[in-house]
């Protein structure tokens, strides 16, 4: 019996390529999406030979309307696709005042719009069958928006909030949605020179990161932070946030604003 097909965005390199490897070894057929057709084809050929699964490649620039529409159409119509890894993303902005507006637009299109629209494209089919898996690649910067640049962490905070909301909406209909929050991971998103200036104990190897994310998925986690030693720390953070909830919407302003 088929294990279902996963579509992976950003599969030509880095984290997405390792997802392709691990999902193929788990017996899933794959559709690999990225811009560089040659890299996708080489990976597909290698993994097909090593694992025997069927792998298709789709070259698309997900930051453009046409590229996004082509992948959306496939997700809507192909009943064999039961899993989506929303992994493609870019970083690399400088300070807001120095970054080109077109670069920021491209980042928002890829990191936010594509994740939203691809998820919206597959969700109706998955909820109709009451099954399926969506894995959204966010980042630890979603939890520390003051620790990096302005737009990239905000884009990843969007993906985290989006995922948590979907866990309620789609989870109740039988669809798994996992948020993965990597810390600094050795991939081409970083210049070698940048990584050389970061303490080695802060940089995870990409295979280790993805294997931990799969362990989190297998353990049923909704939010996986591969480097976090004690899950109680995440639970405490989520509990502190939940404790605000009863007072976040009331019929009167707080006393400190009405003196
Ligand atoms: N590495 C890290 O430290 C961390 C990474 N992340 C996140 O992990 C995800 C993967 O990053 P990582 O593997 O490190 O980065 P890489 O740069 O190694 O890989 C990025 C992938 O996205 C694809 N991609 C980039 N732009 C587009 C586009 N416009 N359309 C389609 N595909 C595109 C690239 O392929 P191609 O160029 O062929 O299009 C490539 O396959 C990102 O969302 C990133 O934000 C999160 C936290 C930490
Ligand atoms: C990939 C990045 O640039 C970022 N530091 C992150 O950890 O997400």
Image: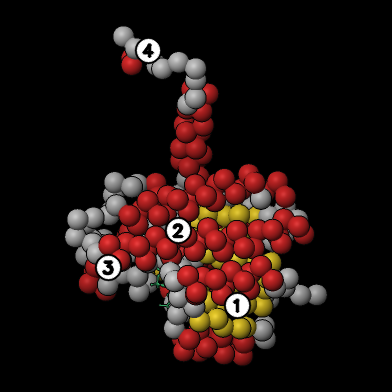
- The residue drawn where x is 32% and y is 62% is 104
The residue lying furthest to the left in this view is: 98
Q: Secondary structure at mark 4?
A: helix
**Where's the N terminus, which quadrant?**
bottom right
> Residue most toward the top?
259
Q: Nearer the viewer, residue 129 or 60?
A: 60
- Closer to us: mark 3 or mark 1? 1
Whether residue 215 appears in this view of the structure is: no
For marks 4 and 3 on the same chain, the one whose residue lies earlier in the sequence: 3
Q: Which mark is residue 112?
A: 2
Q: CA distance from mark 4 to mark 1?
A: 56 Å
- Say whether residue 12 is left or right of residue 107: right
Displayed quadrant of residue 182: bottom left
Question: Which comes before the other along the chain, label 1 or label 2?
Answer: 1
Q: Which residue is mark 1?
A: 31
- Kindly report the distance in space between the C-alpha atoms of the residues bearing marks 4 and 3: 49 Å
Question: Whole-percent x and y of residue 248?
Answer: 47, 26
Tell me the tag on residue 255: 4
Where residue 195 is drawn, which disc sits there?
A: 3
Asked if residue 199 lies left or right of residue 108, the reply is: left
């Amino acid at each position: 019996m088929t294990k279902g097909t996963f579509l992976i965005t950003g599969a030509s390199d880095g984290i997405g390529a390792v997802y392709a490897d691990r999902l193929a070894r788990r017996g899933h057929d794959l559709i690999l999406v990225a811009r560089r057709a040659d890299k996708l084809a080489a990976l597909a050929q290698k993994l097909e030979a090593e694992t025997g699964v069927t792998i298709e490649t789709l070259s698309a620039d997900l930051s453009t309307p046409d590229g996004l529409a082509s992948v959306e159409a496939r997700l809507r119509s192909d009943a064999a696709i039961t899993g989506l890894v929303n992994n493609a993303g870019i970083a690399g902005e400088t300070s807001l005042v120095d970054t080109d507006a077109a670069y920021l637009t491209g980042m928002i299109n890829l990191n936010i719009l594509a994740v939203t629209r691809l998820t919206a494209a597959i969700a109706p089919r998955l909820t109709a069958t009451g099954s399926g898996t969506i894995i959204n690649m966010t980042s630890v910067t979603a939890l520390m928006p003051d620790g990096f640049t302005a737009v990239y962490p905000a884009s990843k905070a969007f993906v985290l909030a989006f995922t948590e909301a979907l866990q309620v909406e789609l989870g109740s209909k039988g669809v798994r949605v996992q948020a993965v929050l990597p810390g600094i991971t050795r991939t081409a998103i970083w210049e070698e020179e940048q990584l050389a200036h970061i303490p080695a104990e802060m940089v995870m190897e990409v295979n280790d990161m993805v294997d931990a994310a799969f362990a989190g998925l297998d353990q049923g986690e909704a939010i996986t932070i591969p480097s976090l030693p004690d899950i109680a720390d995440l639970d405490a953070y989520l509990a502190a946030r939940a404790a605000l909830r009863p007072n976040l919407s009331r019929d009167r302003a707080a006393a400190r604003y009405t003196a």
